[in-house]
Image (cartoon, grey):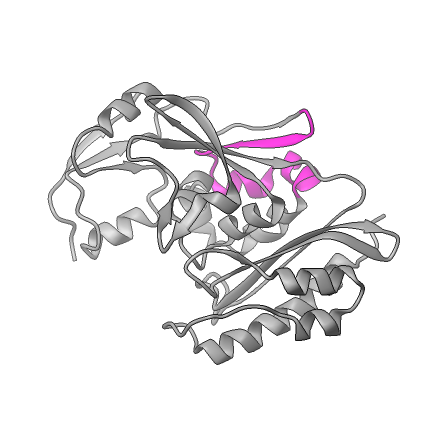
Amino acid sequence: MKPAPFAYQRARSLDEAIALLAEKDAKLLAGGQSLIATLNMRLSSPALLIDINGIGGLDAIALKKGSVEIGALARHTQVERSDIIASHVPLFARAMPHIGHPAIRNRGTLGGSVAFADPAAELPACLLALDGEIEATGPKGTRSVKAQDFFKGLFETALAPQEVLTGVRVPAATRDTRTGFAELARRHGDYAMVGLAATARANGKELSDVRLAYFGVSDIPVRAKKAEAALAEGSIDAAFEALDLDPHDDVQATAKAKKHLAGVLLRRVAMQLTEVRL
């Protein structure tokens, strides 16, 4: 299929993009890896596409005062190959190779993935596991939204109609930071049937501040808090038994299958969290 007719305008500044969003049925175009597909299937029919790729300064990756800031226009490949990400955001480093295929990662953007809020996407769950923040800029200025408050429902976020997602901020890893990531898909690069992003702090063999963020099991990334508590007490088996998820059937798998796979991933990721870091 081909998309319905639409107008196109390339924004040269963030202010211009925000102003253009005031027009009826306007959508932002960044990497386009999700948007173009929905346009072609006519699941989305905006009157205006606002291309923000010409806005400078929105693709930077920087370490600032104990946090890593990543601009919304940073391509997945850029994040994947970043030394700053490898050293200070190991969870992202684990997750990036699972996002689509190389062609998708070459063009797709971090901000686009987060703003699209696909329930099977890796990055929203990673942000939840990291207790990250999303930066949004609109007519009233810039504000930060915690990841736990940003994802509201199926493809729904806390972004206001005239706001642009301009970046994300996550705590930089320390020597006691532990991360884990795994997903199960029918083929590598396909949407995950179930996935798990996790962080914790290690004190010897003990874990604290465990955060288990699942994706593909609900309309938004969700934490398994009872399993987190059990894992912090030192028992993977108890965490498995306490796994508090209520997945639903979808085209990928049944709810029963998803619950089983979530348990499989819990055991795998728990082993990653207990790896000795040199």
Tell me which residue sits at (35%, 37%) in the image.
Answer: 30
Q: Magenta span has 93?
A: no
Q: Is residue 181 visible?
A: yes
Tell me which residue sits at (35%, 30%) in the image.
Answer: 53
- Looking at the image, residue 72 lies above or below residue 127: above
Tell me which residue sits at (37%, 24%) in the image.
Answer: 55
Q: Magenta span has 76?
A: yes
- Looking at the image, residue 8 lies above or below residue 99: above
In this view of the protein, which residue sits in the foreground, 225 or 24?
225
Q: Quadrant of residue 226?
A: bottom right
- Residue 244 percent location from the top left of the image: 58, 68
In this view of the protein, which residue sits in the foreground, 49 or 209?
209
Compared across the picture, whether 160 is left or right of 110 comes to: left
- Residue 274 percent location from the top left of the image: 79, 59
- Looking at the image, residue 5 lies above or below residue 219: above
In this view of the protein, which residue sits in the foreground, 63 or 25?
25
Q: Quadrant of the N terminus?
A: bottom left
- Residue 110 percent location from the top left of the image: 47, 41
- Looking at the image, residue 16 lies above or below residue 247: above
- Residue 210 percent location from the top left of the image: 70, 54
Looking at this view, name the residue that lies furthest to the right. Answer: 204
Q: How many marks?
A: 0
Q: In the rendered structure, which segment of residues is drawn in magenta? A: 65-89
Tell me which residue sits at (57%, 40%) in the image.
Answer: 132
Compared across the picture, whether 5 is left or right of 243 comes to: left
Q: Is residue 13 visible?
A: no
Compared across the picture, whether 131 is left or right of 114 comes to: right
